[in-house]
Amino acid sequence: MNPTGAFQKRTIFLIVYLLFAVLPIYWMVNMSFKSNQEILSSFSLWPQDFTWANYRTIFTDASWYSGYINSLIYVAINMVISVSVALPAAYAFSRYRFLGDKHVFFWLLTNRMTPPAVFLLPFFQLYSTLGLMDTHWAVALAHLVFNVPLAVWILEGFMSGVPREIDETAYIDGYSFPRFFLTIFIPLIKSGVGVAAFFCFMFSWVELLLARTLTSVNAKPIVATMTRTVSASGMDWAVLAAAGTLTIVPGAIVIWFVRHYIAKGFAMGRV
């Protein structure tokens, strides 16, 4: 087979794939700089009447920008708790063998595979009783159900790649477990921590059903706000496109900071 021809085919395939991947994002950004009239009346590859009005609406209307603030608050809470809980759990699965360990590990993953709708009624009833409805903590704690198992699964793979001799040497040198875990072990798996934090952020940021049901006003996230963008004249497509464009920004920033860790996670087969 001609190496040059194979290279050209791979290049063409990559270009076509990138076009299909980028096209929806470009079209959303394109729509965000148009008016509703232009979106509904004509088809154009770029704005004919360029406007920043849609972004001004989001940054000046509390019902819009508060959604981003609420989402960032409960996502940050969830990410910190998920990684903090998953670290010792993953270490236990990685270093110790106990009765039913594989079954417990599989049970954790089944929580991640379960649709959020299954947990909706129990959470709604529990939070209504405890007075947690419409709070950031309500969504953050609910998202632990599927983010903690994912973080444990990812971190366990990274921890299993660290030789056990490091643990034994540290204990011989007089390190207590907390000191060893925080000062020696975690720095060795910092790429795994970055990957786990990224996926916790991503799944919590895009989840809609629980976030929409467990909040109403004070903690309503941006994903819930975007589903209610309907006025008397119909759907506000332009503002919705601007909101969608801004929704991509936090995820893109997180990806930029953990991009090297994600690549390492792919290489280890845990991502």
Image (spheres, grey):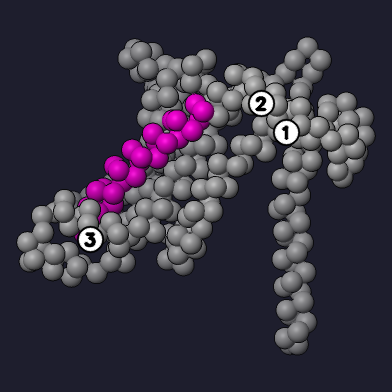
Looking at the rendering, which quadrant does residue 172 occupy? bottom left
The disc, 1 or 2, on the residue closer to the chain's N-terminal end is 2
Task: Give the residue pinned by disc 1.
Answer: 241
- Give me the residue at 77% from left, 22% from top: 235
Whether residue 140 can be seen here: yes
Q: Residue furthest bottom?
A: 2
Q: CA distance from mark 3 to mark 1?
A: 46 Å
- Give me the residue at 48% from left, 37% from top: 204
- Residue 178, image x, y percentages: 16, 51
Say few, some or many: other residues with alpha carbon within 10 Å of mark 1 (under 14 / 14 to 19 / 20 or more).
many
Q: CA distance from mark 1 to mark 2?
A: 11 Å
Task: Give the residue pinned by disc 3.
Answer: 184
Task: Give the residue pinned by disc 2.
Answer: 58
Q: Which residues are magenta?
A: 69-97
Say few, some or many: other residues with alpha carbon within 10 Å of mark 2 (under 14 / 14 to 19 / 20 or more).
many
- Disc 2 residue type (three-letter): Ile
> With respect to residue 2, does 50 lie above or below?
above
The disc, 2 or 3, on the residue closer to the chain's N-terminal end is 2
Query: From the viewer's perspective, is 200 left or right of 190?
Result: right
